[in-house]
Amino acid sequence: MADFITLKLNSDFRRVYARGKSVASNALVIYYLKNRTGKARVGITTSRKIGNAVERNRSRRIIKEGLRRVMPRIKTGYDYVLVARSKTKHLKSTDISSVLLSLLSNEGLILPVEE
């Protein structure tokens, strides 16, 4: 499984937002930026527009589980910020993992499947 570190610092999030590229769907927005660590660093954020604390936490849990399924195929050496949208709380983790795969593969950030 690919190694990844959790983004926690506000400055890291701001750097990815300011300098990174983004790709979006109706359920998720992904910001990404190349880093120098050689590992994938991931941050998940949900705004208060999503709903109350229960709904925001559910959205984060769904994204984390979807990410866990896709993580072995994601390219390392990038910082990723995953932003939940209002539709996220109504989806399942399998739906989020397919959204992650499609968005990241369109950007060339998915490793080829090993046979």
Image (tube, rainbow, N blue to C red):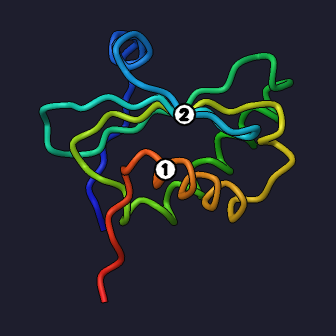
Question: Which part of the image, by quadrant, shows the C terminus?
Answer: bottom left
Q: Give the side of residue 69 with respect to residue 84, left or right.
A: left
Secondary structure at numbered mark 1: helix
Q: Which mark is residue 23?
A: 2
Closer to us: 15 or 22: 22
Secondary structure at numbered mark 2: strand
Q: Give the side of residue 23 with respect to residue 42, left or right.
A: right
Q: Quadrant of residue 51?
A: top right
- The amino acid beneath tag 1 is Asn
Residue 32 higher or lower than 68, as above or below: above
Q: Give the side of residue 43 with respect to residue 74, left or right.
A: right
**Rendered residue at 55%/48% (across/down):** 103
Closer to us: 23 or 2: 23
User: Where does residue 95 sit, x and y in percent of width and height?
Assistant: 72, 60
Closer to us: 104 or 70: 104
Q: Which mark is residue 106?
A: 1
- The amino acid beneath tag 2 is Val
Mark 2 neighbour density, 10 Å: few (under 14) some (14–19) many (20 or more):
few
User: Where does residue 60 sit, x and y in percent of width and height?
Assistant: 65, 40
The reply to whether the C-beta atoms of the residues labelled 2 and 1 are less than 8 Å apart is yes
User: Where does residue 26 sit, x and y in percent of width and height?
Assistant: 76, 38
Question: Which part of the image, by quadrant, shows the N terminus?
Answer: bottom left
Q: Which mark is residue 26?
A: none
**Rendered residue at 40%/38% (across/down):** 42
Residue 22 higher or lower than 101, as above or below: above
